[in-house]
Every structure is written in structure tokens, then in C-alpha cells.
Image (cartoon, coloured by chain):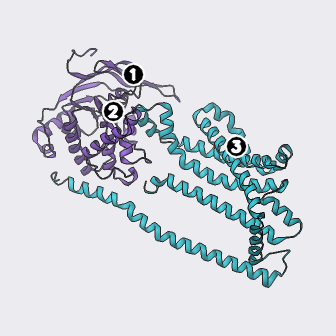
Chain colours: A cyan, B purple
Amino acid sequence: MSVTQVNIPGIVAEEEAAERPAARRKIDRSERTRRIVRSAVSLVVGVLLWEAIARLVVHNDAFLAAPSAVAKRGWEMILNGELLSNTWVSMQELIYGFIIGAIAGIAIGAAMATWKSVSDYLEPWIAGLYAAPMIAFAPVVIIWFGVGIASKVAVVIMMVVFPMIINTQAGLESTDRRLLTVARAFCASGPRIFRTVSIPSAAPFIVAGMRLAVGRGLVGVVVGELFGSRAGLGNIITTASSVFDMPTLFVAVVTLAITGVVLTYLLRAVEMRLAAWREVA
Amino acid sequence: MIDAPPQTESKLEVKGVSVRYINKRTGAETIALDDASFSVGSGEFVCIVGPSGCGKTTLLNCLDGLRPVSGGRILVDGRPVSGPGPDRAMVFQSPSLMPWRTVLKNVTYGLESQGVAASEASERAQKMIDLVGLSGFESYHPGELSGGMQQRVNLARALVIEPEVILLDEPFAALDAQTRELMQAELLRVWRVTKKTAVFITHQISEAVFLADRVIVLSSRPGRVKAIVDIDIPRPRTLEIKHDPLTNQLERHVESLIDSTLTAEQIFAAAGD
């Protein structure tokens, strides 16, 4: 074996390794455009089909509103401020509930990952409550906290806290033990190890939990409002359905869908940023 | 075996160190290291070799203070080791880099823990990155690097804190043969520049002979210091000397000292490596 030439293949291999990510990013971009185009085509075709069925098959606004009728009603509701004020009420409920639920969930999950005893005490409750349809408690919560914003915030917290606990705990427990040893070997203090190793390891799990939780939180808002409220998108839905006002009902539903998509997309973007190093790893 | 004669120049002293641990499931006690004694002079490069499962890594973890000893003492500059400290730095077997940190940020990790100001840390890290041949890769993430480059970062991360003693746990074991030889030569180059005391664990005899001033041979479990072999190959060494008759003679000598009869347990442990 020739020893003098040994450094040349070594260095070539290393340069190849370094060039890979850039090439991969380029492929990602054209693939993404293709996916966006397909999604757009699917949406347009779906809406046209819906319009056709409403106009040519159903002929009855009380059963199915055509997209054009929904758009018209939506525009009116935007102009008279009705849509924005009700959406704002629902958003407030979601944001407060989400923030409180997420912070509590992260704290409880972190405590469970840090201390085995805490985990032992809480595990059965969390397993049970996460599996149970929390939405079934919504009427009880309305009775306890009234028809105002507080009851809906409480429902959202209940929906959000469990996926946050479970993901935070799983994320922290999946931390690479070797990295914990490295941190210890380089004289990092306990809190510093937690901040520089455990948290970054768990961050993608926590954000994935948030993405899951935001969807559940939105369900909590609407169901809470259906059971008792003075305002909000859920309130529009109950009020409109009681008088068979399909266009108004659909405006609320479409607004909820858009909100859900936007929030999930935002969290997805955060997730991609946090886990940028994972793409090539 | 209790006390080595006092050496004025010795940087690291290992005095009658034993490590025992108890298997939690079976309750059986395993003696990983038994009464190991040796010393390493200032600026010396020592390699520790021995059969799989002889407690080499355990010994290194004790030297770094990551694992307590059951008996005996470890002294660095006469001060007993009680835990990890800035006077020692470990180069781990797997690169164990933080995948979310860039190369530069991985190298500054130890300095950050010591409270070194960010600008000074970056400056020192940059010098070390240049030294290990990674200039231009500062902003890369570990996932974008080859195995050899990751080990260079692993080495730079340890050297940058300017430890008295650098501990290396089979850092090249996972590399292909060619990269491994390249990295051995690179390590000697970097070591000559930094002049650190080095303790390097390996089970590859040719690697030990190529790198070391002295090779310490551990016996199979429980690990004891079986022999210490002086490697008087002149420095600076290049990869060509691996084919020198003197080198080959030393390799054969070290090989003859290593226990070749393996117990079933050791074969099992080796298969799991």
C-alpha cells in the first residue's frame, strides 16, 4: 500500500461531503414549486366542483351554500366588522389558552423528564386524560367558568397541555447521552447542560407538539363556543345554523380553516428553522 | 506497584487506581481496573493498548474525572482529580458534536463554559480550526462534514481550552484505513505545535507505536499495567516510518505482550464494539 499518496483520497472525500447540502437544496426548490402548483390546482378544482354542485344539483341555500354566495356573505361580514370582531374573540381565546397551556405543558414535561418520581406520580393521569376526549368536559367547563372568554381559554388549555407535556418529555428523554457527557467533560454546570444540550435536543419535539396543540386548541375554541358563548366564530356557527343561514355558517368554517392552516404553517416554518441542521444530518 | 519513584517532570500520575462496578441486575461485581500505576511526563505522548474490555476507556474516563475511582489516586500536576476540570480535555471516540451548533460554535463550547468572552473564544477557536485544517468550514454544521472532518472538530474542541493533558479515546477507530493514517499524521503535527501531554487509547498496535513516546500495555480484565514499552523512534515522524524495520520490530514486541487468549465474554464484548 502506498503511504505517501494517502492524503489525496482523504481530502477529496472530505470536499465531496461538503458539497452535498447545496446540491440537495436546489433539488428541494423545484420539488417545492411542483407541490405548490398541485395544491393550487386541487383547491381551484374543488371550489369549482362545489360551486357546480350547489348551483346545478342542490339549488337550495338552506342545505348548501355555493362558494360564490359564501364569498359574497364573507365580504359583507368583513365590511360590517362582524367577521373581524368575532375572529378576534376566538383568536384571543386561542392565544391565551395556547400560551398558558404550552408553558404549563413544557414545565410539567421538563419536570417529568428531570425527576423520575414526578413522572411516576403524573404518568397515569396524563395517559388517561390525553386518551380521553377532553372536548367532553367542555360543557362542564362552561358551567364552571361562565359563557365569557375564561371558559374557552380553560378548554383550550386542556386541549393544549397534554400534547405539550408528552412531546417535551419525549424530546428531553431522547437527548443523546454522549452529548451530555461531552458537556460534563467540558465543565458545563447543570443548568448550562440543560440549556445548551437538553433544550436544543428537545426543541424540534416541542415545536412539533405545538403544531399538534394548535390544531387541538382551535377545536377547543369552537366546541367551547358552541356550548356557550356571546361571540366568536363558534358563536356565529351556532347562531347561523339555528336559522339555516348556510352562507354565514360557511364563512365561519372557512375562516377557521384558514386560521388553522396559517397557524400550522407558521409553526412548521419555526420547526424547519430550528431543525435546519437535521436536514443534512 | 504502589508508588512510582518521584519524577520531577511528571504531569500526570496514576497511583494504584482500581475501578469496580456492580451490575445492577445481577448484583455481580466486575473489576474493570486493578491497581494500575504509571506516570506521564510533561509534553509526553503515551498510548494505552490492551485487549477489548480491559478497561481502557474506563481508565480514560477516570483520568478526565467523568467516573470516580474505587481505589487509588490520580494526580495532575500533583493535584488530585475529583471531577472534570479545565486542565484536562477529552477527545471522544465518537465525534459527539452538537449537531445544532456550527463547527465554530462546537469548538467554542468549552470556552463558553469557562466564561471566556465570546470574541476571545471565537478568536481562539478560529486559530484552532486553522490548525486542524478546517479553515473555511467554520459555519458548517456537523451533519455536513465527513467522519474525518468531524474528528478534527472533536480534536479542536479539546485543544482550544489549552488543557495541561489531552485525553484521546480511540478517536480514529471509526474512520476508514486511509483517513485514519492521515489523521494520525495530522495529530502528530498538531501535537508538535501545541506541545500538550497526551494520553491516547487505542487497540491498534501500529497506531500506538507510530504516535507514542511510550506504550502502556494493559492486561485483559481486570486491567493491570502489564508492561511499559519505550518507543524510541525519532521525531518528527512521517507515515513512511510505519514501514521501517525498527517500527515493525516494536509492533511485534508490543503485540507479544498483549493477552491473545480471549474469554468468551471478551469475544462477545469485541463483537459489540
Q: CA distance from mark 3 to mark 2?
A: 43 Å
Q: Is residue A59 above or below residue B176?
A: below
Pick the residue in front: A164 or B41: A164
Residue B82, placed above or below residue B182: above
Residue at the image point whose x is 60% and y is 60% from the top? A265
Q: Which residue is mark 2?
A: B89
Q: Quadrant of the N terminus of chain B?
A: top left
Depth check, front residue: A226 or B84: A226
Q: CA distance from mark 3 to mark 1?
A: 42 Å
Residue B9 in the image, given as x and y percentages of width and height: 20, 21
Q: Residues within 10 Å of mark 2 (few under 14, many from 20)?
A: many
Q: Nearer the viewer, mark 3 or mark 2?
A: 2
Q: Is residue A162 visible?
A: yes
Residue B264 seen in this snapshot: no
Q: Along the horizontal axis of the image, is B242 left or right of B177? A: left
- Residue A65 picture location, percent across and down: 79, 75
Query: Does residue B171 sit above or below B199 in this rendering?
Result: below
Same chain for mark 3 and mark 2? The answer is no
Chain letter of the residue carrying label 2? B
Which residue is under mark 1?
B82
